[in-house]
Each structure stands twice: as C-alpha cells, then as structure tokens.
Image (spheres, rainbow, N blue to C red):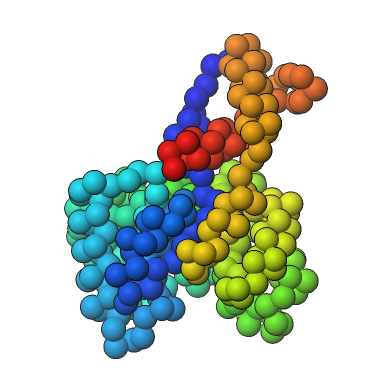
Amino acid sequence: MKTDSNSLLKPRRTLLFVPGNKLEMFPKALASNADVVCIDLEDAISLDNKVVARQEAISLISDHLSSAHNNKVEIWLRINSIRNPLGMADTIALAEVKHAPDGIMIPKIKAPEEIKILRDVLGNKHPNLNFHPLIETTAGLNFCVEIAKSSHKIGSLVLGGFDMSANLRVDPHWDTLLYARQKLVHAAANAGVDLLDMPYFELDNFKGLRRESEECSKLGFTGKCAIHPKQIEAINNTFTPTIEEIEHAKTLIDKYQSQDAAFVEIDGVLMEKPIVDRLYRTLAIADRIKSQ
C-alpha cells in the first residue's frame, strides 16, 4: 500500500507568540527556529488599540506571505473570540484580504459551532487556512472532542492553561491541570490533529521548562507554546526524535509502502494508519531540522 498522504505534514513542536502591538519582534521570532509564529491580537492588546493592531498585523502578514515566505515557519494570527464584535471584526478583515495567515488561533471557544461559522466565512476565500482552537474554558474542555472533529480545517488544539485554571478555580500547576491535559490528548488523538501545551512563564527556569515539556511529551502532546525565543531550543529538543527514531521511522514506512495490507506487523510493530501518521510526523520534524 503506497501512500504519502502525510508527506506535507508540518511539525509543530514550538509556537512563539508575538504581541500584536510589538510587531518589530516579528523578524526575530521568524529567526528563532520556532515551527510556528503566532501574532496575538487578543490578550496582548488593550481595548483601545485593537483596531490599529488588527490592521497592522494583517498588513504585515499579507506582505510577508506575498513576498519571500519561508514556508518552513507557519504564521498564525490569534484573533479575538468570535462571540464578541472584536472577533467578528477580525474575521471579516481576514475574509477581505488576499493573503491570510497559515492558521488562526481561536480563543475562548466554547462549542464546535464557532468553527463552522469561521469555516463558512473564511473557507471559500482562504481554502488553505487552518483553525487552531484554544481550549481555555470549561465549556470548551467539555466539548473538546467535538471541537477537534468539527472540520477538516482543524490543525491542532492548544491548551490555554491560565484561563483554564481560573475557570476550574485552581492555581495553574501541573497537578491541577493534569485532567484537562489528558482530556485534550484524547480529543486531539481521536481527531488526528496536533496538540500544543500552554507556555511556561518562568523565563529563566530552564530546568522547569524542560521538565514540563518532557511530561507533556510523555502524555501525548506534540509541542508547546513559548513566550520568548530563548525557550525555543529546550522545547524543540524535547519534541525532536533521535537519529535512531528517525531512521527507524524511515525503515518502517518504506516497508509499509512496499506491501498492500492496511494493517500488518512489520519488525514487531503493528502498523496501521495512526502509527503511520505518527511516523510521518517524525519524518516531517527530520525535514524541518535539515532546513535549519
């Protein structure tokens, strides 16, 4: 069974936020080796500056994508919640531009209907635009399985841990958010999409960053958000497969493609679509490393 349906899969080990009112940081973010750079129009922007930030961010993204775009770095825009006028204005603005970002992060999502609205408004104009729901409310957590499978345009789920902890009435610690993380792992794996963890906010605590990244990787997360370029290397290292794992993935995929069964044991590994998808992700990361 020969298939390369995942050959265009993009790794999302690291996502680096850029405040929408500090766009001078954008070039440095692109050079940080983050897999995704996300311009934030929501939490980073005061109410009085929302309109200007939207205009400048969308203009920057449009100029960047229409010129020498490095397609190894995904560009996302974190819009405001579409449950309020600001988010609807963000959506309309995106619908009117020629070049949209690679993805939009959708905050405060509570139900899959929000994805359907965005798909209807943006899908025809920007067919390659992916959606990345930010799960940070108890309602969103309750419907995370449905949200993850609400559209083929869903590229990943993202844990918004600080708002989630406030909703859960707990402090944002590992133990208190473990249930939320586990539920999101189930939802993302069930839908076959990526899953990014919340940022680690202690900028100089690299030991803590590595420990939390490793625990997330063990749970089933595929990457983690960052708020500073100096966090990128530690997170990338955690979510990057070893040389041995990369070579093993190549071998298994080659052998799988050379036969016709959809479910087969190869070198002691039961190979089926979820396993093959995971191996393709490994190779996508390997390709990303080569390009750096």
Residue 124 in picture, x, y percent from top left: 28, 48
**Residue at screen point 53% across, 58% down:** 232
Say if 221 sits above or below 227 in the image.
above
Q: Residue furthest top?
A: 259
**Residue at screen point 32% across, 46% down:** 70
Say if 150 sits above or below 168 in the image.
above
**Residue at screen point 64% across, 15% down:** 255
Query: Which is nearer the eye, 239 or 32?
Result: 32
Residue 144 in picture, x, y percent from top left: 60, 60
Apparent side of residue 46 relative to residue 267 in the rendered image (left or right): left
Q: Is residue 215 visible?
A: yes
**Residue at screen point 75% across, 74% down:** 176
Query: Which is nearer the eye, 26 or 109?
Result: 26
Say if 48 sits above or below 101 in the image.
below
Apparent side of residue 286 relative to residue 178 in the rendered image (left or right): left
For residue 75, which quarter of the picture? bottom left
